[in-house]
Amino acid sequence: MTIPVPPQPKIYHIVHLDKLHAILSTGALLCDREIIRRDPTGTTIGMGKIKLRRLSLQLNSRKGLMVGDCVPFYFCPRSVMLYMFHKDNHEEIDYHGGQESIVHLVADLHQTVQWANTNNKRWVFTLSNAGAFYFEDRADLSQLNEINWDAIQTTYWSGCRDAKQAEFLIEEQFPWTLVERIGVYSNEQQLQVNSIIGNVNHCPTVQTMRNWYY
């Protein structure tokens, strides 16, 4: 049975919890190009070589917009990239701190698209990993059915790794006020995150979501 498009899809951005200070200071998550330019404080996660590649990867459905000009999200928690942080055995990964300090910032897809359209920010979604040399992208929500939602929601993705890494990309920045929920590894990280965001006007719910991790 093929899983249909969820009625209210959620999108997930993973970040080291010590990056929250910089995000709150800016009031937004920033794209890789802006992060390189501003060099904010906090631990950078990901694969440096692929981040650089994304700066020159063109999005076909938004001419002139590069992948690295966008803030990236997955359509699920417990991503392939998080697994790579957990295993820490890939030679191109620059971060070696494991998964415990990685937090999931969760937002609603439709609310995000509405904000983007209102604020003249372009957005797309991809059918696979936007850091790969080849991927397809779309700029029409009526085409969400082209995403492999079975792969998105599966726990065992060895046969559908690329499809599970489908992304939502929003141009330049993503406002903190659209973050509706934060998922963390354990109660320890929950306390840490609450202490960081406790004094800001917009304070999303922070929940220990161990099943979002490996």
Image: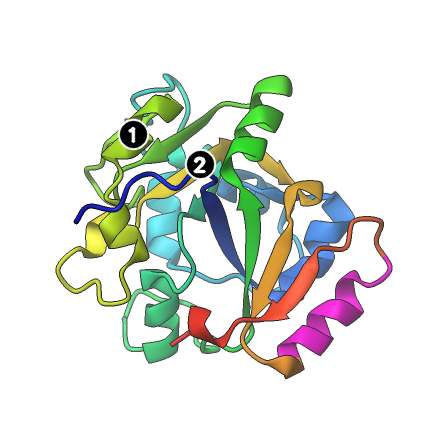
Q: Amino acid at mark 1?
A: Asp
As drawn, the label of residue 169 is: 2
Q: Main secondary structure of the magenta part?
A: helix
Residue occupying image coordinates x 73% and y 43%? 27
Q: How many marks?
A: 2
Q: Is residue 191 above or below residue 162?
A: below
Residue density around tag 2, few if under 14, some if 14–19, many if 20 or more, within 10 Å: many
Secondary structure type for disc 1: strand
Q: Is residue 66 above or below residue 23?
A: above
Closer to the camera in the image, 154 or 120? 154
Residue 135 relative to residue 183: left or right: left
Residue occupying image coordinates x 68% and y 51%? 23
Closer to the camera in the image, 193 or 8? 8
Q: How far is mark 2 from mark 1, CA to CA?
A: 10 Å
Residue occupying image coordinates x 50% and y 33%? 170
Q: Name the spot of residue 12 as percent of width and height, x first.
A: 48, 52
Residue 25 relative to residue 1: left or right: right
Image quadrant assignment for residue 173: top right
Q: Name the spot of residue 15 as percent of width and height, x first.
A: 54, 60
Start-end of magenta stretch: 189-199
Q: Name the spot of residue 36 as percent of width and height, x first.
A: 55, 46
Image quadrant assignment for residue 96: bottom left
Q: Amino acid at mark 2?
A: Leu
Circles 2 and 1: CB distance less than 8 Å?
yes
Q: Is residue 75 above or below residue 168?
A: below
Closer to the camera in the image, 155 or 6? 6
Secondary structure type for disc 2: strand
Residue 172 visible? The answer is no
> Mark 1 sits on what residue?
137
